[in-house]
Amino acid sequence: MGDLNDSRWMAAACALSERARGRTAPNPNVGCVIVSKGRVVGRGWTQPGGRPHAEAAALAQAGEKSRGATVYVTLEPCAHQSDRGPACSDLLIAAGVARVVIALEDPDPRTNGAGAARLREAGIEVTERVGTPAARQAMAGFLTRQAKGRPHVTLKLATSLDGRIALASGESRWITGAAARAHAHLERARHESILVGRGTWDMDSPALDVRLRGLEARSPRRLVLSASGEVRSPGDIAHLEGDHLLVEGGAETAASFLRAGLIDRLLLYRAPILIGSGKAALGDIGMGSLAEAHGRWRLTDERQLGSDRLEVYAAQ
């Protein structure tokens, strides 16, 4: 493991990788920081469409200052050649860097272990597995696609304190306040696709776009799930374009994803209100006993958004 400085610089690289989330598939959203004499001389993240890679962007910014520097990268530099650009391991060797610190080994069989090996063969010091948990979280979409052949799926729920998403009449605008809704729009901008059930589509005619200034162009592709399980767009849940899918409702659609074990991340926005006999957030998710419900979710983040509370959970 690296020292405290390694951890600090890798955290910065992970933060940069988050900028590219939802924009780089099928390539991973990698972040890279180049440090020389305790100062950042180059930084980069994978660009929209997957190129240039993070290392290439950071090296271009650093120029000659990369010689003898330390490179912090969230994923093992690629070792395979591509029509779209040279291998990042070769670029790092040509730039004369002294050390490369890597958070995660690349699961892509074209690089897996070969990138780090090529760097070592060229006399570059390589340190691995620094900041691994944060890098896994930042690149969850790419890693889920590699491991499971499907997007990383986030379920968003906005509820009252008693778990309702609407009044008995169906009125649901607005359960949460402006700050929580703005955060939800930011989450939309971080996903390639967004899905709702046919009932929600027909009843609410949701725009499902991003309404944050400067991010309007990052509105996700809209998908509708029918009662038969068909998606009203080419492809299916296992073959959707992109690595990040956001499920926004309704209750039966959310329940169907949970029953199938397809939810990787849960966003729970909770407003400080009580509704009573309104519409429940979820339908039947197939639990046969309370024992089955325990141990399935791990809290990864929580914050106050105006008067509302956000809790983020990861599937165990």
Image (spheres, helix red, strand yellow):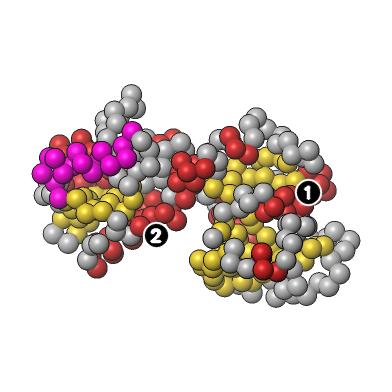
Q: The residue tagged with tag 1: helix, strand or loop?
A: helix
Q: How busy is the neighbourhood of tag 1: few (under 14 within 10 Å), some, or many (20 plus)?
A: some
The magenta region covers 110-125
Q: Is residue 205 visible?
A: no
Q: Residue at x 15, y 55 (%)?
A: 36
Q: How busy is the neighbourhood of tag 2: few (under 14 within 10 Å), some, or many (20 plus)?
A: few
Name the image quarter holding the N terminus.
bottom left
Give the residue pinned by disc 1: 200
User: In the rendered image, which quarter is residue 89 located in?
Assistant: top left
Give the residue pinned by disc 2: 133
Front one among 169 and 279: 279
CA separation in Å, label 1 and label 2: 36 Å
Name the image quarter holding the C terminus.
bottom right
Q: Earlier in the sequence, mark 1 or mark 2?
A: 2
Q: Position of residue 150 (x, y in %)?
A: 55, 41
Q: Residue at x 57, y 73 (%)?
A: 304
Is residue 41 placed above or below 174 in the rendered structure?
above
Q: Position of residue 101 (x, y in %)?
A: 24, 53
Amino acid type assigned to the residue bearing label 2 in the image = Pro
Amino acid type assigned to the residue bearing label 1 in the image = Thr
Q: Position of residue 283 (x, y in %)?
A: 78, 57
Q: Is residue 35 visible?
A: yes
